[in-house]
Amino acid sequence: MSVGGSPSSTTASGSRGNQLRLVDCPRCGVPVVKIRSKQRETYGQFFFKCPNNIREDSRTCGFIRSEQQYEMYVRGLEKRNAIVEGQCMETKAIVGGQCIGDGNDGNDVVRWQCVELMQETGMLKKQIDMALGEIANLKMQISEMKEEKKAFVMHVSVALAGFVGLLVGMLVIAMWK
């Protein structure tokens, strides 16, 4: 399992003057891209997303972060990588607003593994939600197809009844002659 994505040579400058490196998407493994929102609610704000994340398509990658979220994500990767590689066992890291390591008890790697598992659990929950959404869409499509089938059967029945009526009418006319 990748510890945090490989760094890209490209950097992205934040609104606070920070230089953030573009890392690989944790789900797809491709470098994330920096975009500027054109949406009404977030117009002009910067976001970092996976190029495979397509808006309003739940079947695509879900990785997208605001500039602040992305900065926290990248800083967390850097701190986690330093701890895992043994370069900085004294590091204190803030994840989800909680300090997860003071470097004094030697459990930083275990804590980071727990954080990684929690992040993976969150991604799995998101995938389950996407799958449930897809199931709901499929159920709706099946329901629509059933309605279309009912309408088709109704049209065929009406056409068949008209055809039978026409045949009966022609038969009656032929008998009268």
Image (spheres, rainbow, N blue to C red):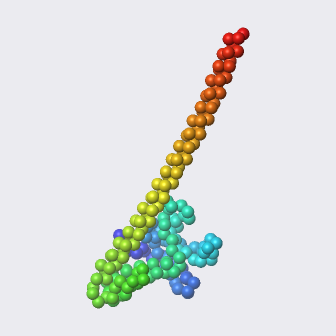
Percent from the top left, x then y, of residue 40?
A: 64, 72
Asked whether residue 78 is in view, the answer is no
Which residue is found at the position 55% from the left and 63% from the top? 56
Percent from the top left, x then y, of residue 69?
A: 49, 78
In this rendering, the answer to whether 36 lies above or below 163 is below
Residue situated furthest right in the rendering: 177
Left or right: 109 as drawn, with respect to 151: left
Asked whether residue 115 is in view, the answer is yes
Which residue is found at the position 35% from the left and 83% from the top? 100
In this rendering, the answer to whether 104 lies above or below 140 is below
Q: Quadrant of residue 35?
A: bottom right
Percent from the top left, x then y, of residue 3?
A: 37, 74
The quarter of the image holding the N terminus is: bottom left
Which residue is found at the position 63% from the left and 30% from the top? 159
Which one is in front, 36 or 123? 123
In this rendering, the answer to whether 7 lies above or below 170 is below
Residue situated furthest top in the rendering: 177
Total marks shown come to: 0
Which one is in front, 127 or 159? 159
The quarter of the image holding the C terminus is: top right
Which one is in front, 53 or 143? 143
Which one is in front, 95 or 169? 169
Q: Quadrant of residue 16?
A: bottom right
Which residue is found at the position 65% from the left and 19% from the top? 168
Percent from the top left, x then y, of residue 85?
A: 33, 81
